[in-house]
Structure formats: C-alpha cells, structure tokens
Image (cartoon, coloured by chain):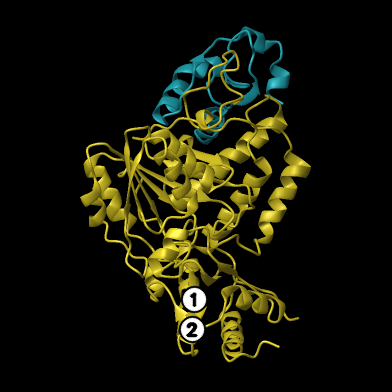
Chain colours: A yellow, B cyan
Amino acid sequence: MGEVIYFDNAATSWPKPKQVLNAMEYYLEEIGGSPGRSGHRMSISASRLIEEARESVGNVFNFFDTSRIIFTKNVTEALNICIFSLLKPGDHAITSSTEHNSVMRPLRHLEKKGVSLSIVKCNSDGTLNPEEILKEIKENTKLVVLTHASNVTGTILLVEKAASICKEKNIPLLVDCAQTAGAVPMSIDLEKFNNCIMAFTGHKSLFGPTGTGGMCIGSNINLSPLICGGTGSKSDKDNQPEFLPDQLESGTINVIGLAGLKAGIDFLLKEGISKIRKHEKELVNAFINGATYIKGVKIYGTKNPEKQAGLVSFNIENMSPSIIGLILDRKYSIMCRIGLHCNPNAHKTDGTFPDGTIRFSFSYFNTIEQVEKSISALKEISVGKID
Amino acid sequence: MITFFSSQQVIKAEKVLRKNGFKVSLIPGPREISPNCGTALCFEYEKEKEISSTLKKNKIIFEAIHYYPEAKKISKWIES
C-alpha cells in the first residue's frame, strides 16, 4: 500500500493543518473554562476565544457584525434554523433541483405541514439561470434557498444574481455554502444584501473539526431558535433572550471545536483564499484533462474549473461506482465517495439516479502528482485490471 | 462598572476599549447590580463619558453604567 490519497474533502477535509490540532490541545490544556458563564479568568479566556473565532469567520465572509455570526453544530443545523424560522403553513418557498438533503428534507417536512414549494430545475450540468427564480416568486414567497455549489457536480450557482433578485422583492435568500466557504471567494456582500443568510460548515474547506458550523445573518433577517436553553445571559428570566448571538446559541458551545475552526480559518486566510482556489482549479483541470481521455469515463457538471468548486463527479461505463470505490481504496489507497451523495434531486438532474457517481473532491493539500496517480489507477480499472 | 446583556458584547467592549487606550478589567458581575451577564467590565469612573461614547461609537450594546463603590475595597484584585 502506498501513500494515502485523500479525495473525499467534500465530505470532510483531511488532513487538517497542524495548527488546528495545536489550538484544540491548547484549549483543553491551558484555557479550559465555559465561555459566557462565569466571570473567572478561564471563562473569560474561553469567551475571548469564541469571539476571535467569530472574527475569523467574518474575515471569510467579509462580514464584521460578529453578533450576527452564529455557531451551530454543522451547516445542517444552521439551514434548519433558517428554514423552520422563516416558513409557516400557507407560505411559499423556492429552491433548486440541485439541493442537498440538508435543505430538501426540512423543506419537504414543512410541505406536509402546509408550506408550498417550487423547485426550479437546473440544467443537466447543474447550472441555474437565476431569472428562473424570478418567475416562481409569488405573493406568499417567504424564502429562497440555494446552494452556492452542488455537492454532486461542484457546479457553482450564481447566487449573487439571486441575492439581488430577492433583495428587490424583499425575500430572504438562504445560501448553503457547505462546499465553498474557505475555498471559493464569497460573492455576496452581506452589508448590501442584508436579506441574505450564508450558512457554512466548519469541517470542510475551513479546515476545522467536525461538530462546527454556523451562519452569517444579514441585518434584515429575524430568526427564531430551534433549541432554547441556557445562554449565560438574562439568568434571572426563564424566557429565551431575544438578542444575538445568545438567542440562537443555547447550551454550552463547542469551544474545543471552535478553537480548531479558528486555527483552520487563520491558516487558510494566511495562505489566501484566491491561492487556494487557484490550486483547486488546477487539480480539477488536471483531473478533467486526464480522465476525459479514458475510454468509458463520463464526467458530469460543467467540466469547466472556473465554474465549479474543487470536486468532480464521474462514472465508468458498465461499472458500478461501489466496485470502483472499493478498488480505489484497497488497491490504490485512494479515498473517495461513491453512490448517491445525500442529494437525490441533483442525481436526477444530471441523470445519475439511482446508481450515483464516483466523486473526487480535492483540498489545498492535494497535489497534481496525486491526481496523475488517480488517473493511472482509473485507466487500469477501466480496462478491467482489477486483480 | 458596565453591565451587559450578552457576554459576547463584554468581550467586544474589552477589545475596543483597550484598543483605545482605556484601562479596563473583566470581573464576575455583581448580582446585586445586574443579573444579566456573568461578566462585568470595570473602569475608572472618571472616564465614564469617554468610555460610554467609545462603546456607542463602536455599536456595542451594554445594559448600564453603574457607580460601584465596593470596587475600591477590592481594587487590588480587580487590577491584578
């Protein structure tokens, strides 16, 4: 077995920068303390750490009202808070046909309770004309939800155009940045488009540990909590505080996770998001260029590195993705995701339902050499050399 | 002494005030003054106006500014 080639960064990034581990260890050993709960120095140090983590997130999104940067346990929780807060029976919501189940399942859940839903169809390469959203807007439309980039094809949606359409119509736009935060520059100015919410995960391109995520909430958006409880504030009252971030952050926050997230973000900001983006585009480009010429390989999405996040979905004719995934792991030490990527609608859009695809998702730590090795492996697999 | 609704605002206040050259210290919030936030910010009362305007300028939300005479007795610990 050779070096492990980790191409599953869209599920969770690996490796993490060493600074992430160091920061988490430092919290456990030196800081300790529960933020916002007590007045002693260890608690205050933990509070400072959480505020610094908010500032780091703000630097990724160019959003500096840290009281409106909320931490959750993952992007799914952030999306759920928004969807459940902003929609009630009788309301209408619009989304796209390339949304992850973290968006589709809460919307379908609410549909059963009387929310109506329009699903705007993307093209087979995953692109979406934002004008299509405009056509679906009704008097009772209370929310538009769009992914920034598909987790199946990587296709980037033109969310900034959607933001201005929604702003004009005074409708909140919720953007799922799970596949882009930290890897693709954020194109929505939340100060200007204060009708938008950007939801993010911490453990993918932001290089934090699992159990971290959150959202940046534009100043024109009011949400309500999914979970109520202790916040360290207004302790004389048994009603939930109505100010942010406390309103949406009940219970002890994941301090050790956020210590790691802050270190991960600080690492990537030091490297530079544009440099990271350039590197990932080179990897995508090298993979597409190499894999296109393998007989039987079909690549999905735009096939244009400029128009997609750092991931590629593909199939090999007449071979099951699960068998290819097994051989890539056991014979070549290449880790990737196969099958349906929690997103039946995207697979229906690109025509890969129900078998799914093989997905290679890259990070800043992958190299062109690794991509070349994977192409050699796929060449062998495609001609049946699987012994 | 300044009390806050949210601990997040206390930390922001500390940062902004120190950046502006004020000597401040965070201590456990006295319950007899306010039940709102576990942590309060102490400063020299003579600087009240300047501090209040600095916080307002930086959009930091605080509950109230109090005169806290007890602080004199424990000043050694507040400043440590």
Give yes or no for contact between labels 1 and 2 (Cβ–Cβ under 8 Å). yes
In three-dimensional space, the C-alpha distance between marks 1 and 2, rounded to whole angstroms, equals 7 Å
Q: Chain of mark 1?
A: A
Q: Is residue A162 left or right of residue A332?
A: left
Spot occupied by residue A376 in the image (x, y as percentages of width and height): 59, 88
Spot occupied by residue A89 in the image (x, y as percentages of width and height): 36, 32
Residue A238's place in the image compared with A50, above or below, is: above
Q: For the N terminus of chain A, which image quadrant?
A: bottom right
Per the image, the residue denoted by label 2 is A297
Spot occupied by residue B1 in the image (x, y as percentages of width and height): 57, 16
Per the image, the residue denoted by label 1 is A314
Secondary-structure class at tag 2? strand
Q: Is residue A78 left or right of residue A40?
A: left
The picture quadrant where one finds residue B78 is top right
Viewer-closest of A27 and A195: A195
Identify the disc placed on residue A95: none
Q: Chain of mark 2?
A: A
Residue A153's place in the image compared with A224, above or below, is: below
Residue drawn at point x = 58 percent, y = 12 percent = B34
Earlier residue among tags 1 and 2? 2
Of the residues shown, which amino acid type is indicated by label 1?
Phe
Residue A64 visible somewhere in the drawing: no
Viewer-closest of B44 and A325: A325
Residue drawn at point x = 66 percent, y = 26 percent = A37
Residue A351 visible somewhere in the drawing: yes
Secondary-structure class at tag 1? strand
Residue A85's place in the image compared with A78, above or below, is: above
Viewer-closest of B37 and A337: A337
Residue B12's place in the image compared with B67, above or below, is: below
- Local crowd size for mark 1, using a 10 Å CA cut-off: few (<14), some (14–19), many (≥20): many
The picture quadrant where one finds residue A4 is bottom right
- Local crowd size for mark 2, using a 10 Å CA cut-off: few (<14), some (14–19), many (≥20): some
